[in-house]
Image: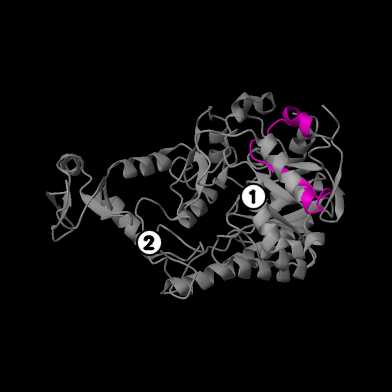
């Protein structure tokens, strides 16, 4: 493979390998600092990051507010404290090598307040901010105000064009790079548009080439593109290196850093990664964000799939074929189904799924009473971790609501991601991963359960493997 040539990113020459930022304590100061110490760009997550008390004990994020708005303010305070903590750890671990970036999701609750708060509290320790999950128009202005580089995450040239035209054209000097995240192959939330088929992955090369051509038209021919999603062996991307049509390119690794000694995920999670097979990571649309996301098929996802499968359309009044009366709720108030759907509904109730819950789309889903209680409790305890949540109907606006019914087909993403990153069973929680995660089991580097240090991984990546 061609030798990797350093790139100047965020003000320093670094290896063109970037640690992908993974939310809620999955990429932290230890992992990102180690990646930077190895000469690359380490990225800690600014999404609900962990903080510690004076004795070095993990601060348990307990919410005392009686309202969602009050709990939302607590979440912002936790987020700022955690982000500053992880930035300090990353800086110390890096030993001044490489670069440290912070990753935020624009659609997370309190994104602007948390980003500003962390950058104020960790002055000089963070060199760049990556931001996706939405259209982060304001991230450039925030980054410039704090004297750092910004790296928007996009999935198409069209998305970058919109960002550039509306906001980024005013701050070209601080645009450190553009992260192209493959919407079919990357782990976590994906930026598939309505015009793209989730079942038919597209070749990333022409899409990235279109992005480069768009950037060149704006005078950004020397601004790096960071390829993210689906990257495992760099030798498989050799045609991208020193390619005059693509210009400067770096590569982001999100899934491979999960399986390192510095990775904070649990041993059970690491062992699970070593057992995955092709097809075990699936693209789904259960996330309360409304985005597609890629996660490991496990009991958690299978329950969501089964929940949505037990679903029928209803009408509050007899209309058309919806004339079959069906009792709903503790008072048995009637709704109207088709005769076929009523038979299915009775079959589900006989199987123990006796609680019918209404969705925003005029349908009923059938769950056990225990699952219904859990869903309602999670909705009530919402702390506003998203700017708009389909599951709880919280929204970060004056009204504090999306204006729609809460959707019982989804889940509290804050609850499950904090659980899996703090000891929860990876089979029973949302387990984000890229679609190449099955390669852990096939890659000889991980033979006999070998788990490398971050430095060993970066050195291995640099060889092409």
Q: How many marks?
A: 2
Per the rendering, the mark at residue 379 is 2
User: In front here: 309 or 86?
Assistant: 309
- The answer to which of 123 and 174 lies nearer the viewer is 174
**The C terminus sits in image quarter:** top right
Q: Where residue 92 appears, x then y in whole percent?
A: 78, 57
Q: Please name the residue shown 26% across and 54% down the image.
A: 357
Give x and y (percent) for residue 202. Answer: 60, 34
Q: Is residue 171 above or below residue 2?
A: below
Please give the name of the residue rendered at 67% of the width and 58% of the height, measured from the top-left corner.
163
Q: In whole angstroms, how far apart are the C-alphas of marks 1 and 2?
A: 35 Å
Q: In the displayed orientation, state which residue is furthest to the front.
A: 217
Taking the image as shown, residue 125 lies to the left or right of residue 76, namely right
Label whose residue precedes the other's in the sequence (1 or 2): 1
Where is residue 66, by image quadrant?
bottom left
The mark closer to the camera, 1 or 2, is 1
215 or 276, nearer to the observer = 215
Q: Secondary structure at mark 1?
A: helix
The quarter in which the N terminus is drawn is: top right
Residue 345 shows in this picture: yes
Rendered location of residue 58, percent (x, y): 59, 60
Q: In the rendered view, tell whether residue 104 sits above or below residue 39.
A: below
Q: Is residue 53 visible?
A: no
226 is within the stretch colored magenta: yes
According to the image, label 1 marks what residue? 158
Magenta stretch bounds: 216-240
- Residue 312 left/right relative to 205: left
Residue at point 56% right, 40% down?
Answer: 433
User: Circles 1 and 2: CB distance less than 8 Å?
Assistant: no
Q: Quadrant of residue 273?
A: top right
The reply, left or right, for residue 51 in relation to residue 340 is: right
Quadrant location of residue 403? bottom left
């Amino acid at each position: 493979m061609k030798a990797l040539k350093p790139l100047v990113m965020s003000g320093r020459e670094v290896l063109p390998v970037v640690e992908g930022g993974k939310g809620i304590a999955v990429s932290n100061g230890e992992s990102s600092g180690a990646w930077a110490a190895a000469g690359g760009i380490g990225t800690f997550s600014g999404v609900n990051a962990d903080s510690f008390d004076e004795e070095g004990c993990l601060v348990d994020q307990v919410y005392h507010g009686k309202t969602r708005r009050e709990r939302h303010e607590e979440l912002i305070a936790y987020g700022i404290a955690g982000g500053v903590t992880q930035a300090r750890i990353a800086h110390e671990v890096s030993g001044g090598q490489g670069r440290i970036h912070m990753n935020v999701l624009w659609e997370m609750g309190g994104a602007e307040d948390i980003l500003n708060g962390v950058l104020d509290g960790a002055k000089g320790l963070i060199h760049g901010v990556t931001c996706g999950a939405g259209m982060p128009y304001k991230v450039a202005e925030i980054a410039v105000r704090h004297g750092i580089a910004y790296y928007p995450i996009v999935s198409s040239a069209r998305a970058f064009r919109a960002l550039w035209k509306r906001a980024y054209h005013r701050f070209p000097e601080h645009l450190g790079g553009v992260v192209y995240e493959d919407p079919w192959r990357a782990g976590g939330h994906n930026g598939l548009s309505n015009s793209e088929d989730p079942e038919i992955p597209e070749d990333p090369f022409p899409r990235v080439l279109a992005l480069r051509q768009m950037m060149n038209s704006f005078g950004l021919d020397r601004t790096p593109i960071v390829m993210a999603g689906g990257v495992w062996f760099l030798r498989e991307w050799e045609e991208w290196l020193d390619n005059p049509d693509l210009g400067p390119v770096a590569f982001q690794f999100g899934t491979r850093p999960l399986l390192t000694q510095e990775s904070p995920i649990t041993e059970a999670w690491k062992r699970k990664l070593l057992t995955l097979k092709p097809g075990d990571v699936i693209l789904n649309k259960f996330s309360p964000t409304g985005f597609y996301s890629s996660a490991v098929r496990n009991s958690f996802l299978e329950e969501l799939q089964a929940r949505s499968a037990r679903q029928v359309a209803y009408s509050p009044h007899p209309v058309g074929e919806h004339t079959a009366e069906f009792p709903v709720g503790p008072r048995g108030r009637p709704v109207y189904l088709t005769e076929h759907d009523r038979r299915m509904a009775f079959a589900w109730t006989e199987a123990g799924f006796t609680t019918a819950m209404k969705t925003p789309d005029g349908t009923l889903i059938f769950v056990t009473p225990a699952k219904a209680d859990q869903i309602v409790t999670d909705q009530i305890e919402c702390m506003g971790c998203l700017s708009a949540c389909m599951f709880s109907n919280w929204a970060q606006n004056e009204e504090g609501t999306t204006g729609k019914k809460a959707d019982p087909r989804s889940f509290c993403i804050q609850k499950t991601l904090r659980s899996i990153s703090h000891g929860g069973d990876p089979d029973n929680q949302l387990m984000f991963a890229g679609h190449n995660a099955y390669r852990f089991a096939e890659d000889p580097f991980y033979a006999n359960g070998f788990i490398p240090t971050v430095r060993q991984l970066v050195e291995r990546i640099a060889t092409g493997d």
